[in-house]
Every structure is written in structure tokens, then in C-alpha cells.
Amino acid sequence: MSGPGDVPPQILERLRPICRRLPETYEEPAWIGVRWRIRARTVGHVYTPDPKRFPDYARLTIAGQAPTVMTFRAPIDDLLGLTARGFPFFRAPWGPNVAAVVLGDHTDWTEVAELLTDSYCEMAPRFLAAQVVILPPSA
């Protein structure tokens, strides 16, 4: 099984500042990888699944390496458009509004910040979601 240390440090370095900007969000080790939560609700979860143990991820390997995947919540109205694009996005097999993205050198980190912000707004109490500051793309 993968553990928190299996997520490449450079990916955690990109995700941590994004999640720290979201009110009352905290990071914790998950059963696999690392997750960020608001109260007891997961906003984002990053992990490196073992394609041998989870064969569905075998198609997502990059240069023979296991993918690093982040799951998040997406507004239902955005979910189909996002996942219909194909790689690096796909629907996660649990929850009606759960999507996933394969992270790596190809990642648009501005888009990831937007996705995590949207996920936070889906999961946070309304009064906290109202406090979210949308930063310009250059931030």
C-alpha cells in the first residue's frame, strides 16, 4: 500500500500553498497519500496508487511510473465538461461529484488551484466558502 511519503515532494510543495489559502483547511496523512480537509470533509486527496493493486490506474502510468493522482469535488455542472476532456482528468468511481486529475510535469497549476478552490466551496460551510478570495491567474 502507498503511504504519505509516496507523493513526490515537488507535488506536495505545489499543493500546500494552494490549500493553505483556504479558510480553516488542514493537511493530514490519509490511508493512502495526503489529504486536505475542511472540518471532516475532504477537499483534495493526493496519492500514488499501485497499478498492480489497483489495475484501473495502470492505464494512467507515465513512462512506466505509477501516476500521482489528486481527487477533488467538482460542481455537478462542471463535472462532465472537465472529465470529458480525457487525460489528465477522469471520474473517480465514488460519489456523484468526485473527479480526479493525474499530476506531473504536464500539470497546469493555475487550473489545479481553481479546482481545489471549487472543491473547497463544495465542501465547506457556506460562511467559510464566502470568505474565499479568488486570486488572479498570475498569483
Image (cartoon, rainbow, N blue to C red):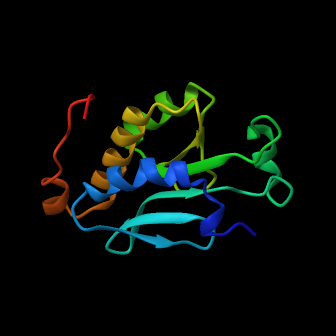
66 in relation to 107, above or below: below
In the displayed structure, does residue 132 sit left or right of residue 69?
Answer: left
Kindly indicate the quadrant of the structure image that contains residue 129: bottom left
Q: Residue at 34% across / 39% down in the picture?
A: 114
In the displayed structure, does residue 46 sit left or right of residue 110?
Answer: right
Q: Residue furthest right?
A: 52
| Location of the C terminus (image quadrant) | top left
Q: x%, y% of residue 81?
A: 47, 28
**Along the line of sight, the residue nearer the viewer: 99 or 96:** 99
| Location of the N terminus (image quadrant) | bottom right
**Along the line of sight, the residue nearer the viewer: 28 or 126:** 28
Q: Residue furthest top?
A: 85
Q: x%, y% of residue 88?
A: 60, 33
Q: Residue at 66% across / 69% down in the picture?
A: 3
In the displayed structure, does residue 15 sit left or right of residue 21?
Answer: right
80 in relation to 85, above or below: below
Residue 71 appears anywhere in the view? no
